[in-house]
Amino acid sequence: MEKRHKPKGIYEKLVKRPLDIVCALAAILAFWWVYVIVAILVRIKLGSPVIFRQKRPGKDEEIFELYKFRTMTDERDENGELLPDEIRLTKFGGFLRSTSLDELPEAFNILKGDMSVIGPRPLLVQYLPLYNEEQRIRHDVRPGLSGYAQVHGRNTVSWQEKFAMDVKYVDNITFLGDVKIIWDTVKVALKREGVSSGSSVTMEPFRGNN
C-alpha cells in the first residue's frame, strides 16, 4: 500500500529530533535516582527481569524493541498459561502504570531513535494488519512516549477515536502543540486519569474496525 508523506515543517524536519535527544538525556541525568529506586522496587516486588521488552512497530512500521519497567508477575495456571492481566497486575504495578513510572526506560528508546517524546503511542505488532488506510498514517512519524490521544482520554476512549486523534496529530505537528501535550501529560499523570478502560485494567485488544 502506498503511504502518504505529508511535507514536513521546519520543526518536524530540523528541530524535533535534536530536541528529543536533549529531553531524553536531561530526563535520564536528572532522574537517574528515580530509575534506580524503581528498578530496586520492581526487583523486590515483581522479580526479574526488571525491564519488560516487547516488539512494537515504529516509524514506517519498522519493528523495534520497547523498554518499560515490568508491572506484572509471571503467574501461570496449571497448563502453564499466563493468568489474566487483572490477576498478574499487582497494586505496585498498578501504581507504576497510573503514574507512568513504568515508561521511564522509554527515554533510551528515544535516544536510539526508535521513539520521540511526543507522537502516537507504539502499539502491538499484531494490530498492523487490522488498520485501515487512514489509521496507518499514525506510523508516518516516530511513536511517542506520550501523545495527543494520551491526554485526551487515554484508555477511556475507543480505538477508533484514539486512532483519529493520532492522525490529527500527524497532520498538525508543531512545537507549541508538543509543548502543550507535554504539559497536559504531566497533569494527567499527577491525576492518574484514563489508566483503565472501565472494563479492563488497561485497554481491550484492538480487533479491527468491524
Image (cartoon, rainbow, N blue to C red):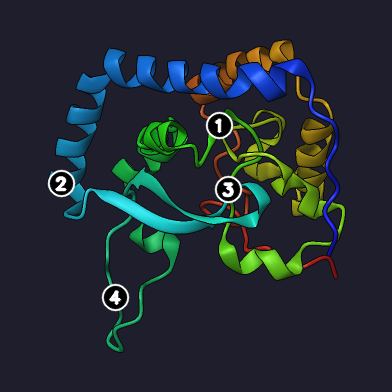
Q: Amino acid at mark 3?
A: Pro
The 10 Å Cα crowd at callout 1, few under 14, some 14 to 19, many 20 or more, is: many
Q: Residue at x 58, y 31 (%)?
A: 193
Q: Amino acid at mark 4?
A: Arg
Question: Tag 1 or tag 2, which sits nearer the N-term?
Answer: 2
Identify the residue under disc 2. Answer: 43
Identify the residue under disc 4. Answer: 76
Give above or below for 33 relative to 116: above
Q: Residue 35, how many percent across, how many down?
A: 25, 29
Identify the residue under disc 3. Answer: 122
Question: Tag 1 or tag 4, which sits nearer the N-term?
Answer: 4
Q: Is residue 57 visible?
A: yes
Whole-angstrom CA distance, mark 4 to mark 3, is 27 Å
Which label lies toward us, 4 or 1?
1
Q: What's the mark number on residue 116?
A: 1
Which label lies toward us, 3 or 2?
3
Asked whether the residues under the numbered discs 1 and 3 touch, taking CB atoms below 8 Å apart as contact, a structural biologist would say no
The one nearer the camera, 199 or 37, is 37
Q: Amino acid at mark 1?
A: Ser
Quadrant of residue 155 within the rendered picture:
top right
Q: What's the mark number on residue 126?
A: none
The 10 Å Cα crowd at callout 3, few under 14, some 14 to 19, many 20 or more, is: many
